[in-house]
Image: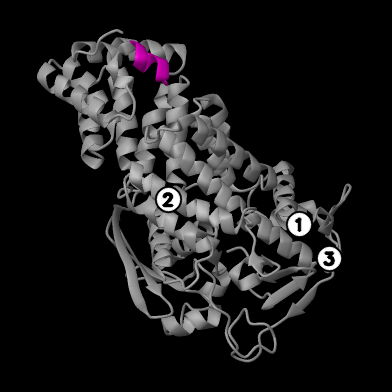
Amino acid sequence: MAVDPVSEAPASVEFGRFRILPHRREVLADGQPIELGGRAFDILMALVEANGSVVGKDDLIGRVWPGRVIEEGNLRAQIRALRTALGEPDLIRTVAGRGYQFTGEVRKSSARGDEPIGLEVGSTTPAAAPRLSIVVLPFLNLSDDREQQYFADGITEDLTTDLSRLVGYSIISRNTAFTYRNRPSDTKHIGRELGVRYVLEGSVQRSGNRIRVSAQLIDAETDTHLWADRLDRDAGDLLALQDEITSQIAVALHAELVRAEAARPAVQPDAVDYVLRARALYLGNVPTRRGYAEQIALYERALALDADSQKVQSFLAWQLAARVLDQMTDTAASDLARAEMLADRALTAFPGTALAHFAKAQVLRAQQRFEEAIPEYETVLAINRNWVLAIAALGYCKFITGSIDEAIPAQERAIRLSPRDPRIWLYYYWTGQVHLLLSRIDEAVSWFEKARGANPEHPLPHAYLASAYSLKGESGRGIAELARARDLGSDDRYGSIARLRAVGPFGAPKIRTLFEATYFLGLRQAGMPEE
């Protein structure tokens, strides 16, 4: 196991207007947390601990990517992201041919006695635990085979890593968490000691060729169980299984944590409170016009309180673009113009954040600039491999630009990672779209029916069922579905073939040809006129 760079770190490290809380993996600027990726944080700690000495490039790569062969360009990219996040590029000096040097004047403090980690020396009252702060305790191995402990440890480490990639989270380092392996699990004490709001516990049990992984989320302040899940799988490839299980738990856990935080009462809500409330609405509901209006109103209130927050700018840009994509706005042009402005502003100020790249990708997809959206989604997934909508949308963009074979595997992964996702209807719909274009009509009908069942108020599944039913020879059902699509649509796109062609998107030439031979043919059979 690689040595964690903050396992023996002081309670806090200060330089200029910044304060590092190593055990929370958090950096504050003027008392407010700044967004910093896990690798950038590790680089910052390595440079700070060098006490002004130059740290070689190979040493940094070995520490941040232990046991992996990494190109130097990855290190340079993380240094750029770190300088951007700090906003003071001169704090990190490039020493040509050697490496990097931290130039700030560092002051360190350590916790005294049994004082909770994260307190400033001399403080008498524990500081409030940060929002979305969590420790992943070592998963227990309940198997008879003690050799399975490595699998349980791997689940713990991967979950810690996956959660550290999420926007706004404060995650206790894995080595600190592992010190609790053989200690009684007093959740309230752990919460106070580490300064976190939430504790994740879990266990792994293997019987024959079956593995069961259980996890539960606990509110550390009240010792209340908030969420639990259990996954049963065939052992197979243990590394692949570990990857799938940790990803699925991380996705589900993110939604539960956001809901829990949004539900906390706030006497005087700040920008973060409004963002959390909006995120909870997004994560808990299928898209509707009213839902989008409520989310956007919350982001607008957050932006009014913190106009320079790239997080708020990005979330607002994302939702403005999303309601255009979902055909749930009467102001598509102005929505997209504002979304593009906000996304560009966030991306310019913080080019290293997954959220800003995702916002930009959504805007580009809404503008039908699919080729440009692809690298943005790929950047998101390079930072956070579990961003489910990015996985699915990337598959769709590749499909619509001609790589049809890449579409269904992406949707399958999205469905597997987030089986209770309110947007699962979209992944069903995109899967059905591929089957339809390849003239696998029965499969297409099955997936479109799933999409309709998951979101009966959206026009797209009805429109595609109109075509698929008609191609299957069920003209009555096709006619009924087309009528329903027209009723639900926010414009007259389902009024004629010409109108539908005009609004698109129907992709690259070879994809458009497939649409003509299947989708449009079925709609004609359902009664859609040419003009």
Label 2 is placed on what type of residue?
Gln
Tell me which residue sits at (41%, 38%) in the image. Answer: 323
- Number of marks in the image? 3
Residue 378 visible to an observer of this rendering: no
The relative height of residue 363 versus residue 251 in the rendered view (above or below) is above
**Outermost residue toward the top?**
530
Secondary structure beneath disc 2?
Answer: helix
Label 3 is placed on what type of residue?
Gly
Label 1 is placed on what type of residue?
Asp
Magenta run includes residue 501? yes
x and y, in percent, of residue 426 in the image: 34, 36
Point out which mark residue 295 bears.
2
Quarter holding the N terminus is: bottom right
x and y, in percent, of residue 494 in the image: 29, 20
Quarter holding the C terminus is: top left
Relative to the observer, which residue lies in front, 326 or 141?
A: 326
Secondary structure beneath disc 3?
Answer: loop
Separation of residues labelled 2 and 3 (CA atoms): 41 Å
x and y, in percent, of residue 366 in the image: 48, 30
Q: Which residue is mark 1?
A: 59
Tell me which residue sits at (46%, 16%) in the image. Answer: 508
- As drawn, is 93 to the left or to the right of 371? right
Please report whichever mark, 2 or 3, sits nearer to the chain's N-terminal start: 3
Tell me which residue sits at (75%, 53%) in the image. Answer: 83
Magenta highlight range: 498-505
